[in-house]
Image (tube, rainbow, N blue to C red):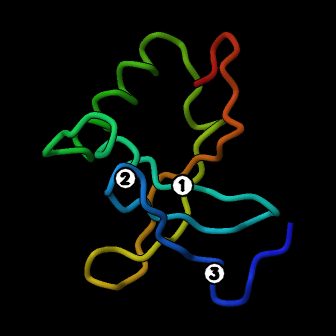
Amino acid sequence: MKVAEGQENALVVFQGKGIHRIWQDEEWYFSVIDIIKVLTESSRPRKYWSDLKSKLDEEGFEVSEKIGQLKLPAEDGKLRITDCATTKMGMGRNSI
């Protein structure tokens, strides 16, 4: 799949909310924090994700194998490292 020039970093809209994404290694990576914010309507999605990662780690899930850290544009326009995932995340035993 070829991505149009200037669309490598793009904001997509899901249920009226913005989700940051980046095209890398021939697939889209989406901001986990943005997805959590949309799906949970949490006012503190970073804290929600931090707590969830800790809980999953305690239960033996290997979150780091499925989640990558990439630079995405933040609200202030600067690039910030954030946890990202693809739509191909495994759902097998001990994976998220």
The quadrant where residue 18 appears: bottom left
Could you tell me the amino acid type at mark 2? Asp
Residue at horizontal 70%, vertical 27%? 90
Residues at badges 2 and 3 in contact (C-beta under 8 Å)?
A: no
Residue receiving disc 1: 30
| Amino acid at pointer 1 | Phe
| Residue on which the image places disc 3 | 7
Mark 2 vs mark 3: in front: 3
Q: Name the quarter where the N terminus is drawn.
A: bottom right
> Earlier along the polypeptide chain: callout 1 or callout 3?
3
Across and down, in percent, residue 81 comes to: 45, 66
**SS at mark 3 in the image:** loop
Splitting the image into 4 quarters, where does residue 45 fall?
Answer: top left
Question: Dot 2: what SS?
Answer: helix
Compared to residue 28, the image places residue 78 above or below, namely below
Query: Measuring 53% from the left and 74% from the top, which residue is drawn there?
Result: 10
88 relative to 2 in the view: left or right: left
| Residue 78, quarter of picture | bottom left
Circle 3: residue type: Gln
Residue 37 point in image, percent of width and height: 28, 45
Residue 8 appears left or right of 72: right
Residue 72 percent across, percent down from the top left: 47, 71
Looking at the image, residue 62 sits to the left or right of residue 58; the answer is right
Give the labeled residue for mark 2. Answer: 34
| Mark 1 in CB contact with mark 2 (< 8 angstroms) | yes
